[in-house]
Image (tube, helix red, strand yellow):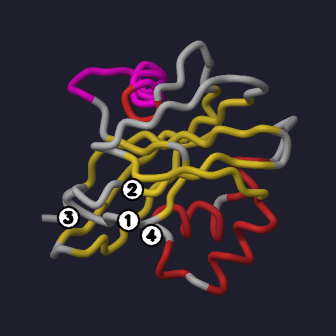
Amino acid sequence: QGLRHKAVSVFVMQGSKTLLQRRALSKYHTPGLWTNACCTHPEWNEAGLDCATRRLKEELGIIGQTPVYRDAIEYSADVGNKMVENEVVEIFVVRASKFFVNPNPNEVMDYRWETLKDLHKQIKSKPEQFTPWLKIYLEQHAEKIFTSYAG
C-alpha cells in the first residue's frame, strides 16, 4: 500500500571501501540486486541500533561490531513486484578493520567490497544492478552519511 514505515540501513566500511551484498533470489522484492551491507524493518518497539546489530548478524554473520547512527532519511521508491517502499530510515555506519563475514544464503547470495568512488561509477553505468534505496542514499544523501565519517 506504500504506507510510510520505519527501516534501518547499515553501511560497513573498511577505509574507503564499503561492503555490498547481493540480495538472495528468494527475496520478496529486489532479488539478485546489489545493496549496502544490510537493510531491514525493525521489530515492534525495537530500537534502531538493536535492529542494525541484529541484522548484521542474521544477514552477514557479522558480530562484535558497533553500528554508529549517522542520520534519518525519508524516501519512497518502486521496488518492483507491485510494491513501494515509503520509509523513514535510520542509517548506521560500522567502521571495521577485521571481522568474519558468513552470509546467510536465505538473505545474501554474494558480497564484495567496493570503494565509494567505484560504486558511484558502477551505479551510473549499470543502475539496474542496484537496489533503488542504495542509489537514493548515494545520489542524494552521501554527504550526510559519510561526511565527518573518519574512515
Left or right of 20: which side holds 131? left
Q: Residues within 10 Å of mark 3 (few under 14, many from 20)?
A: few
Residue 45 magenta-highlighted? yes
Left or right of 133: which side holds 2? left
Identity, as a three-letter code, of the amino acid under mark 4: Pro
Above or below — where is 47 with respect to 76?
Answer: above
Give the mark nearer the N terminus: 2 vs 3: 3
Mark 1 and mark 2: Cα distance apart in space: 5 Å
Judging from the image, what secondary structure is the residue with disc 4 in? helix
Mark 2 and mark 4: Cα distance apart in space: 13 Å
Identity, as a three-letter code, of the amino acid under mark 2: Arg
- Pair 2/3: label in front: 2
Mark 3 and mark 1: Cα distance apart in space: 22 Å
Give the mark nearer the N terminus: 2 vs 4: 2
Q: Mainly helix, strand or loop, the magenta region?
A: helix
Q: Residue furthest top?
A: 64
Mark carried by residue 132: 4
Give the mark nearer the N terminus: 1 vs 2: 2
Q: Which residues are magenta?
A: 43-57
- The residue at which mark 1 appears reads as 32
- The residue at which mark 3 appears reads as 2
Residue 47 magenta-highlighted? yes
